[in-house]
Amino acid sequence: MTLEERRDGAVVIDRLVAAMNDHDLDRMVALFHPAYDSRQPAHPGRAFVGREQVRANWAAMFGGIPDFRAEVVRSVQDGDLNWSEWVWRGIRSDGQPFEVRGVTLFEIRDGLIVAGTLYVEDVERAPLGIEDAVEGMSGARPE
């Protein structure tokens, strides 16, 4: 992969963040391939294929979180694959705070996001300590 191709992946992510923060659905959706393939390994039922589902999902997000903001904390381009750490924030229209953090792996070819693997989760509002988290996962509490 050439330096220019690596830059192109970073440019696509920069454009994605800008479109998200501008709530520009058309500009955002234009960055996705028509047959975009989305996977969330921790939530397999959320998988989908198609740019139109991206549109439907983000129309709901922008409608439900009027002050939605996205931030890329860090991003690395590895061939066609972009790894980005994200923070999404806002206040939902029902007054509840919204904060999601996580990592996306986007496959970018010819200036379009063709596939994504997302590891993004709601930030806990009442955080558990590590002992409680380990006990919840394993059934045994650390000493």
Image (cartoon, rainbow, N blue to C red):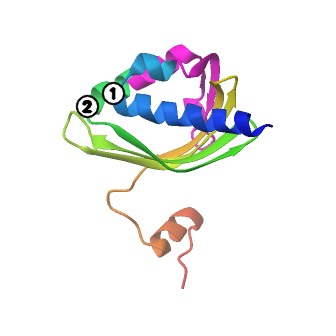
- Residue furthest to the right in view is 1
> Which numbered circle lies on residue 125?
none
Residue nearest the observer in this picture, 16 or 38: 16
Q: Residue at x 48, y 75 (%)?
A: 131
- Magenta-highlighted residues: 30-58
What numbered label is drawn on residue 66? 2
As rendered, which of 3 and 56 lies closer to the eye? 3
Q: Is residue 49 magenta?
A: yes
Residue 127 lies left or right of residue 78; in this view the side is left
Residue at the far bottom: name it.
143
- Which of 82 and 128 lies nearest the eye of the viewer? 82
Dot 2 and dot 1 residues touching (CB under 8 Å): yes
Percent of width and height locating residue 50: 59, 17
Q: Secondary structure at mark 1?
A: helix
Per the image, the residue denoted by label 1 is 62
Q: Which residue is farthest front?
A: 4
Q: Would residue 7 be counted in the magenta stretch? A: no
Q: Residues within 10 Å of mark 2 (few under 14, many from 20)?
A: few
- Whether 89 is drawn above or below 37: the answer is below
At x 37% / y 21%, what residue is drawn? 59
The residue under label 2 is which amino acid type?
Pro
